[in-house]
Amino acid sequence: MKIQAKTFRFLTISTVLVSCLLGCDGREEINLANGGSEVGNPNRVALSVVSYDSSLSRVGTHYLLSGLSIIEARIVLGSIQFRSMESCTDQPGEGRIDFNGPFVIDLLSNRSFPEIESADIPEGTYCKIDLRFDELSQNDLPEGVSKGDPIIGQSLLIRGSRSDGIPFVVQIKKKDPFKLKNQGLGFQVGSEGFLDFLIAFDLSVWFTEVDLATADLTSGTIIIDQNHNQSLLSKIRRNIKLSARLFQDLNENRQLETDEQIEVLAQGLE
């Protein structure tokens, strides 16, 4: 799949679409941070949401293995919450919202509207991050998103074309929660841990096992939404969530570097 971006740089929240690096045994290396689970004094924590390509097959232009070309990939995040080990349940967290959207994130230019500001998060051990894709309301447009923008009313918008030139559009219109979870001992925030994080989405796996050759066309376009090609939509939604990874922003530049991809602090789950 070939993704044509104005500039394929890494995003500012850092929603970094993340690269799935494998260990020598074929499994991803998940950082199992040591230390206690108590939550203490607050720290200013920076977060960016970006995209990346684990296939390492791009030079200026992004190539995806399925032969597709993507010209637009935007998501809307409504809320982002760090969950401590004490509150690590399967239910969405209540109370404190660390980063409150909506944030419209362009994963091809790696820009967020508005930019995600740092937030006070108590130091301690955390097990996961709860996120939610949200419909963007006409009454709640962030600066940088104009009236009439096709992302309005959507929580996700992808546009591109098949290898034969047939265009496709993927649209999700509902609120859709998911999480990034550390399956081990958790990850540290604060003086004993990290203060700068990147959430990265791996674009190269979004269309894994999604056969657009089987899709129904509407006026010459493949429309994938709640009313068209629903089975394909379910696979894409799942792939996007599972493609997300949490990394430490070692050099605090809000970009995902190669050396920062080694330690995966948490991975996407439905």
Image (cartoon, rainbow, N blue to C red):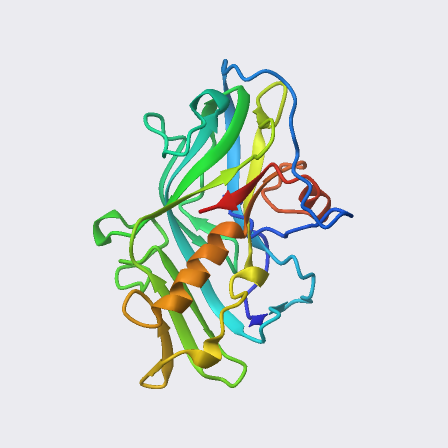
Q: Residue at x 58, y 76 (%)?
A: 67
Horizontal side of residue 232 vs 162, given as left or right = left
Residue 12 visible at all: no
**Above or below — where is 145 with respect to 167?**
above
Residue 185 x %, y %: 60, 26
Residue 209 x %, y %: 53, 67
Residue 46 visible at all: yes
Q: Residue at x 63, y 18 (%)?
A: 35
Horizontal side of residue 18 vs 15, given as left or right = right
Q: How many marks?
A: 0
Residue 178 x %, y %: 42, 44
Residue 179 x %, y %: 45, 41
**Above or below — where is 240 with respect to 256?**
below
Extreme residue toward the right, this view: 24
Q: Residue at x 72, y 50 (%)?
A: 26
Which quadrant does the N terminus fall into? Answer: bottom right
Horizontal side of residue 266 vs 97, given as left or right = right
**Above or below — where is 46 with respect to 204?**
above
Q: Nearer the viewer, residue 240 or 247?
A: 240
When asked about the image quadrant of residue 151, the answer is bottom left
Horizontal side of residue 54 vs 246, given as left or right = right
